[in-house]
Image (cartoon, grey):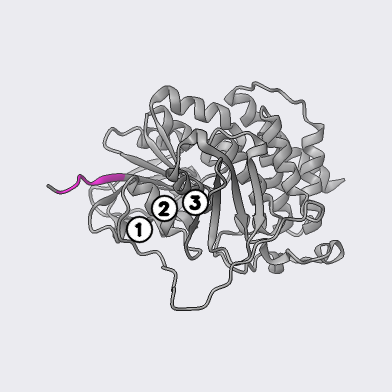
Amino acid sequence: MTDPVTNVAVLGSTGSIGRSTLEVIAASRGSLRAVVLSAHGNTDLLEQQTRSAGPRQIVVTDPAAAKSHDWSSLPKGVELLVGHEALAQAVSDTEIDVVVSAIVGSAGLRGTWASLQAGKTVALANKETLVVAGPLVTRLAEQRGARLLPVDSEHSAVFQAMQAGRRDEVRRVVLTASGGPFRTYTAEQLAQVSVADALDHPTWDMGPKITIDSATMMNKALEIIEARWLFDLSPDQIGVVIHPQSIVHSMVEFQDGSVIAQLSPPDMKLPIQYALTFPKRCPGVAEKLDWDQAMQLQFEPPDFERFGALRLGLEVARAGGTAGAVLNGANEAAVAAFLDRRLGFHEIVPACKSVLDEHNFDPNPTLEQVLALDGWARQEVLRWVCA
C-alpha cells in the first residue's frame, strides 16, 4: 500500500522559507501536495508558483495588491481569496493536513492561530508567533488537539535530538549561533556597521529582516523565547554557544551527561522536510555533508556585553506575559528603521530595551492585549528614532 498524500498549505509562499518549502514538495514524488499558497503583496511570484505547484486556492492578504494584479492568466480551477479573514478560512479546510507558517514577523501569528484553532499540524517557521504569544499559542494547540512542529533549524535540531531520550531526562538544550558577520567586532566597529555590511551573512541566505536579526543576535534572543514555550523549558535550561560553521544546529544535553547534536549543511530544506514528513525520514533535496573533506567545528561562549540582545532574550523568557510581544514589536520596527537608514546598527538593541523597560507589564494577557502591545511597541520605537 502507498502512503496517503499529505496536503500542505504554505503561508508566505513567496518568502525564503516558502520557496524552499515548494522545492521540498516538488521533490517529494507526489507524497506532498501544495493545496493552498498565500502571499501578502508579491502577486507576480505567487502566480508563477501557482502555475508550477497547482494549488486549489491562493490567498493574497493585501487587498490593494490583489486588486492591482491582472489575474486573467490564472490557471483554471484555482480559487483566489483576498484578505486576512480569507486566510483563516483557507487553512480551516478539512483536506489540509499540515500548515507551513512562514509569514515573517508578528503578521504570521493570525495564520498560525487560525490553523491551530482548526486543529491542524503547524510546521512553524515563524518564531515570532511564540515570542509574542507563547503560552496562549501552546495552550490553544493543546485544547484543539493541534500540533506544533518546529521548522527553525535550531529548534528542529533540538526536536530531533530529543528523540534520543525521554522529555524528563533532558537537562538543558544548547542553541547554536553563527555569530553573524560581526562576532569579532568591537563596540566601536559595531557603531560603524552599514546596511550592506549587516546584510552580508557568512553562512545563511535569508530575507533582510532575519539577516539583520542574525547580525544583532536578536534572532537568538527570539529563539531562546521560542524554545522556552515550544519545549516547555525553564530559561535556565536554555544555553547559547557560538558556532561559526553552522553545521551543528543545536544540541540537547541529557541528565547522564550525554549530548546529542544534529548536524547538516546550512540548508533550510532539511528541517522543512522533517516537519512535513515527521515521524518519517525520506530522501530529500537538502545538501549533504561531505565526509571525504576535512572539517573543523568551532565552539565559543557568546559575549553578552557586545551582543546585549541575548540578555534581553533571557529576561523576556523569564518574564513571560506581555514582554515577548513588546520585544518583538520593538525589534521589527527598529530593524525597519535601520534598513531605512534612520537608526544605527548599534542602536537597534538599546531601542528595544528602552521600549521594553517602559511598558506596563501584564503576566497574563489576552491575545488582543499582546497584539495591541506589539503595535504600541512599534510606535514607541518610531518616537525613539525621532527623539
SS at circle 3: helix
Location of residue 285 (image quadrant): bottom left
Q: Residue 161's spot in the image, x, y percent? A: 47, 48
Identify the residue at horizontal 44%, vertical 45% (top origin).
164
Q: Residue 3's spot in the image, x, y percent? A: 19, 47
The numbered disc on residue 208 is: none
Location of residue 94 (image quadrant): top left
| Quadrant in the picture for the C terminus | top right
N-terminal of the pair, mark 2 or mark 3, is: 3
Q: Report how far apart the C-alphas of labels 2 and 3 lie in the structure.
A: 11 Å
- Main secondary structure of the magenta stretch: loop
CB under 8 Å between discs 2 and 3? no
SS at circle 1: helix
Position of residue 254 relative to residue 233, above or below, is: below
SS at circle 2: helix
- For disc 2, the marked residue is 272
Q: Which residues are magenta?
A: 2-7
Decide which of 308, 173 is in the foreground and name it: 173
Position of residue 62 relative to residue 179, above or below, is: above
Decide which of 138, 161 is in the foreground and name it: 161
- For disc 1, the marked residue is 24
- How packed mark 3 is, by other alpha carbons closer than 10 Å (few <14, some 14-19, many 20 or more), is many
N-terminal of the pair, mark 1 or mark 3, is: 1
Q: Which three-letter amino acid code belongs to the residue tagged 1?
A: Val
CB under 8 Å between discs 2 and 1? yes
Q: Residue 65's spot in the image, x, y percent? A: 48, 49
The numbered disc on residue 157 is: 3
Q: Report how far apart the C-alphas of labels 1 and 3 lie in the structure.
A: 18 Å
